[in-house]
Amino acid sequence: MKTLLFICLLLAVCFSLYGCAPVIVAGTVAGAGVTVAADRRSPDKIIEDEAIEIQATDYIYSNPKFGKEVHVS
């Protein structure tokens, strides 16, 4: 009985979240558009800078000397 109740609640939550997905995606896209519009750099430079940031973060986290104990912002 508890398993059935859990499954029903889980399905209810899943169906309720499904309706929120377009709102979340639209909000994320709008936020990214505002960020690009407010930045003086060209969109190509913004993407290039983000790629450099991802590469540096991956290098730091994959280095056994630092590991997950370092945070770079």
Image (tube, rainbow, N blue to C red):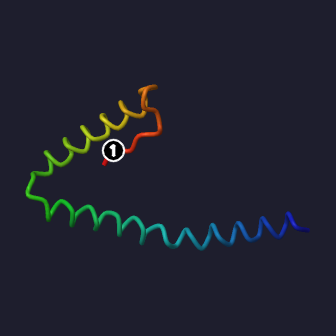
* Residue 14, image x, y percentages: 63, 66
Q: Nearer the viewer, residue 63 or 29?
A: 63
What residue is shown with label 1? 72
Nearer to us in this view, 60 or 18: 60
Above-or-below relation of 2 to 62: below
Picture coordinates of residue 42 (x, y %)?
Answer: 10, 51
Q: Residue at x 28, y 68 (%)?
A: 30
Q: Position of residue 19 (x, y in %)?
A: 52, 73
Q: Is residue 28 left or right of residue 42?
A: right
The number of numbered discs placed on residues in the rendered structure image is 1
Q: Residues within 10 Å of mark 1 (few under 14, many from 20)?
A: few
The image quadrant that residue 71 belongs to is top left
Give the residue drawn at x 31%, y 34%.
55
Which residue reaches farthest top? 64
Task: Identify the residue at image location x=13%, y=45%.
Answer: 45
Identify the residue at the far right of this view.
1
Viewer-closest of 43 and 16 = 43
- Judged left or right of residue 11, residue 16 is left
What is the three-letter code of the residue carrying label 1?
Val
